[in-house]
Image: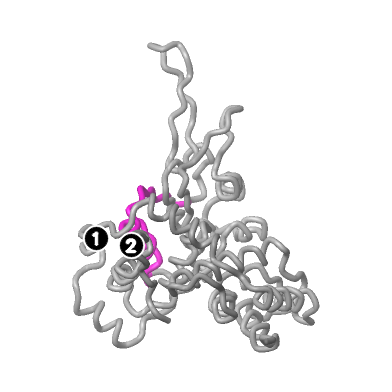
């Protein structure tokens, strides 16, 4: 798929190819996953990276933060983490004779929630309002989060000891769930022979700014969607609700999530309209973690089967 097309006067869009290239130069051999991660950011969604340790989940999150010029905080989720540890707390200041709110790491532009499934359900639920509304209620007062507030969470699906699996309501707050997987031989060789990724991260320049991200999100929302593409998306949604292997089909909110991601994918390709191929490119990342298999079927395999079964009508 071609890089984003720079149009006259569109500086934010013109900078996107360099931003993509910079992250791909750090997270080697994962161009599709990196592009999906950018689509997630442009769609204004949150991202869940689910994979084994050591394949680059945290590196990808840090690379996105540095490249997009976002202020970020990292929180290591553990069993003893409390909601106030991430939201903040009011502390009484004797010299002023009143309580003053001290914001926690949640008040940032990009929050890396590392090993989120090691946090207790109480801590996980503390993120719900923030992820859904970009605000939190603390001590009876509603406090707004930054305009580009984004959560990138990681978890290891194999190490289940001492973990609290995310409930469906929390999973639904993530626009996408991605797995990076092992690098191919060429990418792994480049990693082994190259510089340490942490050292390279410190040298990354910002290719975008928070203002660029806001402008790009506005452009993504304006990408045109034809009736034919909406028909195709509705057919996919309907197929999930009438599938023998799926307990509960995709909700209308899930359909809106697929549409937002497809618009962002089209913008990354430099188009002002969505094509069926855009829906197909993002469907598994957006829909798989929202599907509830009846048996032991893989959610990803169900998403792939749906794409194969539902045809695109002219």
Image quarter where the C terminus lies is: bottom right
The picture places residue 105, in percent across and down from the top left corner, at: 42, 42
Q: Are marks 1 and 2 in contact (CB under 8 Å)?
A: yes
Helix, strand or loop for disc 2: helix
The picture places residue 45, in percent across and down from the top left corner, at: 53, 58
The picture places residue 284, in percent across and down from the top left corner, at: 58, 76
Mark 2 or mark 1, which is nearer the start of the sequence?
Answer: 2
Eyeballing the image, is 311 above or below 251?
below
**Horizontal arrangement in the rendering, residue 66 relative to residue 253 (left or right):** left
State which region is magenta: 54-77
Q: Residue at image x 38%, y 48%?
A: 73
Q: Quadrant of residue 117?
A: bottom right
Image quarter where the N terminus lies is: bottom left
Q: Which mark is residue 63?
A: 2
Q: Is residue 64 magenta?
A: yes
Q: Residue furthest front?
A: 8
Helix, strand or loop for disc 1: loop
The picture places residue 130, in percent across and down from the top left corner, at: 56, 45
Question: In 3D space, how far apart are the residues under numbered discs 1 and 2 (Cα atoms)?
Answer: 8 Å
Q: Nearer the viewer, residue 18 or 78?
A: 18
Q: Is residue 225 magenta?
A: no
Is any atom of residue 284 visible in this view? no
Q: Nearer the viewer, residue 6 or 140?
A: 6
Q: Which mark is residue 204?
A: 1
Q: Quadrant of residue 247?
A: bottom right
**Horizontal arrangement in the rendering, residue 72 relative to residue 98 (left or right):** left
Eyeballing the image, is 296 above or below 265?
below
Q: Residue at image x 49%, y 41%?
A: 145
Q: Residue at image x 23%, y 78%?
A: 192
Q: How many marks?
A: 2
**Horizontal arrangement in the rendering, residue 207 relative to residue 300 (left or right):** left
């Amino acid at each position: 798929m071609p890089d984003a097309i720079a149009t006259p006067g569109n500086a934010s869009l013109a900078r996107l190819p360099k931003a993509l290239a910079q992250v791909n130069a750090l997270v080697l051999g994962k161009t599709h996953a990196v592009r999906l991660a950018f689509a997630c950011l442009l769609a204004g969604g949150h991202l869940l990276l689910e994979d084994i340790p050591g394949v680059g989940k945290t590196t990808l999150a840090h690379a996105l933060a540095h490249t997009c010029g976002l202020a970020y905080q990292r929180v290591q989720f553990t069993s003893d983490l409390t909601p106030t540890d991430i939201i903040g707390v009011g502390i009484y200041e004797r010299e002023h004779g009143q309580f003053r709110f001290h914001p926690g790491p949640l008040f940032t532009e990009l929050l890396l929630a590392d090993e989120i499934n090691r946090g207790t359900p109480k801590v996980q639920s503390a993120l719900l309002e923030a992820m859904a509304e970009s605000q939190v209620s603390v001590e009876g007062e509603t406090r707004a989060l930054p305009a580009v507030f984004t959560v990138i969470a990681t978890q290891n699906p194999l190490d289940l000891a001492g973990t609290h699996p995310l409930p469906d309501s929390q999973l639904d707050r993530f626009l996408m769930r991605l797995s990076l997987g092992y690098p191919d031989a060429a990418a792994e060789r480049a990693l082994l022979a190259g510089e340490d990724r942490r050292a390279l991260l410190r040298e990354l320049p910002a290719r975008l700014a928070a203002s660029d991200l806001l402008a790009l999100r506005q452009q993504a929302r304006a990408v045109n969607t034809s009736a034919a593409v909406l028909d195709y998306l509705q057919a996919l949604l309907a197929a999930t609700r009438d599938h023998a292997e799926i307990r509960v089909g995709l909700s209308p909110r899930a359909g809106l999530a697929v549409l937002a991601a497809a618009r962002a994918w089209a913008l990354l390709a430099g188009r002002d309209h969505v094509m069926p191929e855009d829906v197909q490119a993002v469907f598994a990342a957006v829909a798989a973690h929202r599907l509830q298999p009846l048996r032991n079927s893989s959610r990803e395999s169900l998403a792939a089967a749906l794409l194969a079964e539902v045809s695109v009508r002219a």
